[in-house]
Amino acid sequence: MTFIIRQISRTADGREIIRTATHEGTSIVVGRDAACEIHLADLAVEMQHANIARLEGGRALVSALGSLGFLENGRQTHSATIETKVGAELRFGSHRLTIGQDGDAISISVERVEALSDSSEEKDEAALFTLKGLLPGRR
């Protein structure tokens, strides 16, 4: 039982860097803890956030280990059964995990994406840490 994990990161000029790791076993753990097989450095992710277990018939069971849950194809959930031949997209904080099948192995692509925003407007990063919107105007 094999999991193929592809960590995808981008350079400043937009090139992709793909690091591939193989893990043997029936399940892997996703979380912020460095001991997790899929380590996500994000404060929106719990230390041990979810478990991905291989099931019979080309399926995978993703279950939350804590109280936060995750997004499966845009839907908030705490547990999901995924057909690996069809695939699925999972969101943990600002990371996207794409689960699929690569031969007999379950392949998981991990990529950091922009965090979900409340509005479609781009917010100025410096304005996030000021009191400008909370204080009354000068006039």
Image: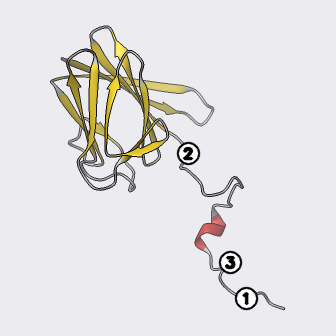
Quadrant location of the N terminus in the rendered image:
top left
Q: Which residue is mark 3?
A: 133
Q: Quadrant of residue 63?
A: top left
Helix, strand or loop at mark 1: loop
Going from N to C along the chain, the mark reached first, 3 or 2, is: 2
Q: Amino acid at mark 3?
A: Gly
Distance Cα–Cα, label 1 vs label 3: 8 Å
Helix, strand or loop at mark 2: loop
Q: Which mark is residue 136?
A: 1
Q: Is residue 106 above or below residue 122?
A: above
Q: Amino acid at mark 2?
A: Glu
Distance Cα–Cα, label 2 vs label 1: 31 Å
Q: Quadrant of residue 77?
A: top left
Residue 84 percent coordinates (x, y): 35, 19
How would you rate the neighbour count of disc 1 (Cα within 10 Å): few for under 14, some for 14-19, many for 20 or more? few
Helix, strand or loop at mark 3: loop
Residue at 80%, 90% (x, y): give it: 138
Distance Cα–Cα, label 3 vs label 2: 23 Å
Residue at the extreme top of the image, as rendered: 103
Name the residue nearer the viewer: 134 or 6.
134
Residue at 56%, 45% (x, y): give it: 114
Q: Is residue 132 above or below residue 21?
A: below
How would you rate the neighbour count of disc 2 (Cα within 10 Å): few for under 14, some for 14-19, many for 20 or more? few
Q: Which mark is residue 114?
A: 2
Going from N to C along the chain, the mark reached first, 2 or 1, is: 2
Residue at 63%, 61% (x, y): give it: 125
Q: Quadrant of residue 3?
A: top left
